Image (tube, rainbow, N blue to C red):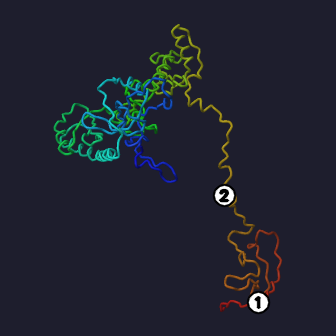
Amino acid sequence: MGCSSCSTGKGGLPAGCNNNGACGTCGCGDKMSVFDWLTGIPLPPGQKPFDIVEVRFKNGRKAFFRNSQLSLYTGDVVVVDMALGHDVGIISLTGELVRIQLKKKDVKDNYELKKVLRKATEEDITKWQHARTLEKDTMMGARSLAQQLNLQMKISDVEYQGDGTKAIFYYTAEDRVDFRELIKKLAERFRVKIEMKQIGYRAEAGRLGGIGSCGRELCCSTWLTDFRAVSTGAARYQQLSLNPSKLAGQCGKLKCCLNYELDQYVEAVRDLPPTHLKLRLPKGSASHFKTDIFKRIVYYTLDDEPGGAPFALPVEQVFEILDKNKKGIKLEIGEDIYRSDKEKEKEKVEVGFAQVVGQDSLTRFDKNKKKGGKSGQRRPGGNRPNGGPSPSGQTNAAKPAHSSGQKNTPRSEGNKGPQSGPKKNHPPRPQQPPKKGPQPPQNPS
């Protein structure tokens, strides 16, 4: 059974319900799901199928019900019996794995288990989906009523029963809350049976879901079911800074993932030297600064040099120094051990890579290519070819030096160019005949 938003999208791709793992109308977003690895394996001869099934409701809430000879499979929408009315849920697990889940959650197989009434009809599903649409408005109205009554509580979620006759209000609070007046006003306003259920902050984060600082979905909303106590000692063992903003999760408590690798860190710390012991070196006593568990290196600082850079010692060398200090043997240690990591890095020579960027100038092709002459002098006619038309339309013919017909005289010594020796007088060039075709009008002189 799939919800209306799980249809096929563009290009044949599934559209998805976009409910971030909290889909309550289909099996596509089953939170806290258990993989049924016994599917398709036949039962031994003579053994009957287990008659209890696991049913999932909103936000991963699950319960066990007895099957009354119905052919049920994972993902079927069923109507189950409740203390007041009936509810609608989805089959999340069947078969022999349900027997294991009963033992894990300490649920007894007795007469107190409710029954699966029938498979949900279209009318049941329509009524159930209508009740789900009322949950958000009901939650906002309940929050406003709690604020008017000055109750120190936070209503985080509302869940309607499948038949719409009952609503469960999930809330968190630091202390005990007297909500009797709130229940009366909620019943008068929404006309349903009211049930108040207090949950912890971690359970609230698991119901609402979200993305953690690691970039993945919250563990409490995907697979984590038992919330163990987390202390700051777990952060100290892992050499983490005691920063509340970084160690706290979305629930406001310490992150549950601090306990995941705690046992490995505790085991690794046992092989390291004690941090309270001081080293007696030729330069004086040295106190513990920090420990690198992965590299098995311990950092110490000299007591006589406050503010000095810490120096690193391997774990084996630290044990050797402590053993000699205990026996009273004089240490013969060079000055190299007192150097910090920064001083050691400066002595390293970088080999194998050369930085060639910047050796070639970007303006190497933009050099001045003038061939002699002063920068202020210009040739007559510019760069135009001989005989070419000028901008005014006149031909670029050579003109005599003087209009009176005087001969060209050599330049004075002060006006000589870069060429050596006196220049020869050249006769004026003959005027070229005008080109055929219409000529542009000449400006009157």
Question: Which residue is drawn at the image coordinates 46% and 18% (left, top)?
Answer: 275
Q: Depth check: 42 or 342 in front?
A: 42
Q: Depth check: 250 or 390 in front?
A: 250
Locate residue 422, reporting x and y percent: 82, 74
Is any part of residue 303 visible from this angle? no
Q: Depth check: 147 or 41 in front?
A: 41
Three-letter amino acid code of the residue under disc 1: Lys
Query: Disc 1 versus disc 2: distance between alpha carbons?
Result: 47 Å
Q: Earlier in the sequence, mark 1 or mark 2?
A: 2
Disc ID at residue 26: none
Locate residue 76, reporting x and y percent: 40, 39
Disc 2: which residue: 363
Question: Which residue is drawn at the image coordinates 62% and 31% (left, top)?
Answer: 347
In the image, residue 215 above or below residue 235: below
Tell me the element at label 1. Answer: loop
Locate residue 211, reporting x and y percent: 42, 40
Quadrant of the snapshot with the C terminus: bottom right
Characterize the local packing of mark 2: few (<14), some (14-19) or many (20 or more) Cα atoms within 10 angstroms: few
Locate residue 92, reporting x and y percent: 41, 35
Is any part of residue 148 visible from this angle? yes
On screen, residue 329 versus residue 405, left or right, reads left
Disc 1: which residue: 436
Q: Which of the 4 image quadrants contains residue 317?
A: top right
Question: Which residue is drawn at the image coordinates 54% and 17% (left, top)?
Answer: 318
Three-letter amino acid code of the residue under disc 2: Thr
